[in-house]
Image (spheres, rainbow, N blue to C red):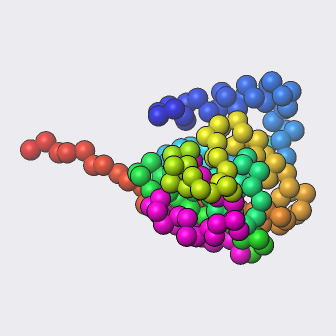
């Protein structure tokens, strides 16, 4: 949706809970996306999750989109994940063989991505538009934009984090706050003179 997420999300959550037969008091943890993504979308998701956590006393677990994409692609570490920014560049994060070797997020042009993942040594998880650039990479795995797949991946990651008391093969639990890589792009309205 381009607009209206804040109005649609609460009733959608209620329908999901009703369909699953779960009462509010039965929620023990809430996995919430922290980014990268649209500035407004991240803030809406976090606000809804925080509101639900206040009502249910559930634990909030932040899940970054890179980890969810890695999970959906069934990539093994070490890996490099690239997510389109919407501005012709990519949010990129490198996952080391050990979670303590993971890198911070960078914003890169397509041509700068491949050198970060040595051929044959790293899985490369990237959107389909990069397939032409990295056609020779047998270790390139497609990235899904399927929201249901990403939500299920986030739930699996959160479950593993809970089972390991906050630290496990997925690294440490993230706080439920936005993962901002770049400042939001804001276009100011022209003032009439």
Residue 10 lies left or right of residue 6; in this view the side is right
Q: Out of 130 and 149, give the one closest to the viewer.
A: 130
Residue 154 pos. (x, y %): 74, 48
Residue 139 pos. (x, y %): 69, 57
Residue 90 pos. (x, y %): 50, 57
Q: Residue at x 71, y 54 (%)?
A: 70
Q: Out of 74 and 185, give the one closest to the viewer.
A: 74
Q: Residue at x 35, y 51 (%)?
A: 186
Residue 55 falls within the magenta-colored stretch: no
Residue 116 lies left or right of residue 86; in this view the side is right
Residue 119 falls within the magenta-colored stretch: yes
Q: Out of 176 and 83, give the one closest to the viewer.
A: 83
Count of numbered tags: 0
Q: Give the range drawn in magenta.
A: 101-127
Q: Which residue is drawn at 65% across and 37% down?
A: 147
Up the image or down, 94 lies above or below 131; here it is below
Up the image or down, 176 lies above or below 101; here it is above
Residue 183 pos. (x, y %): 43, 60
Task: Assign the C terminus to one quadrant of the image.
Answer: top left
Question: Is residue 98 shown to the viewer in this render?
Answer: yes
Q: Residue at x 51, y 32 (%)?
A: 1
In this view, the residue farthest toward the left is 193
In the rendered image, which quarter is residue 178 located in? bottom right
């Amino acid at each position: 949706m381009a607009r209206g997420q804040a109005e649609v999300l609460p009733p959608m959550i209620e329908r999901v809970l009703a369909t699953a037969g779960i009462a509010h008091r039965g929620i023990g943890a809430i996995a919430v996306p922290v980014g990268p993504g649209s500035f407004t979308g991240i803030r809406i998701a976090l606000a809804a999750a925080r509101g639900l956590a206040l009502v249910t006393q559930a634990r909030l677990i932040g899940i970054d989109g890179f980890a969810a994409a890695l999970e959906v692609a069934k990539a093994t570490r070490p890996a490099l994940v690239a997510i389109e920014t919407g501005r012709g560049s990519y949010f990129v994060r490198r996952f080391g063989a050990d979670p303590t070797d993971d890198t911070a997020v960078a914003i890169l042009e397509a041509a700068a991505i491949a050198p970060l993942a040595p051929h044959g040594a790293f899985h490369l998880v990237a959107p389909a538009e990069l397939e032409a650039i990295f056609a020779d990479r047998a270790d390139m795995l497609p990235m899904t934009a399927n929201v249901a797949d990403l939500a299920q991946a986030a739930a699996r990651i959160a479950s593993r984090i809970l089972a390991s008391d906050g630290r496990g093969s997925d690294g440490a639990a993230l706080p439920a706050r936005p993962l901002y890589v770049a400042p939001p792009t804001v276009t100011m309205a022209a003032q009439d003179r």
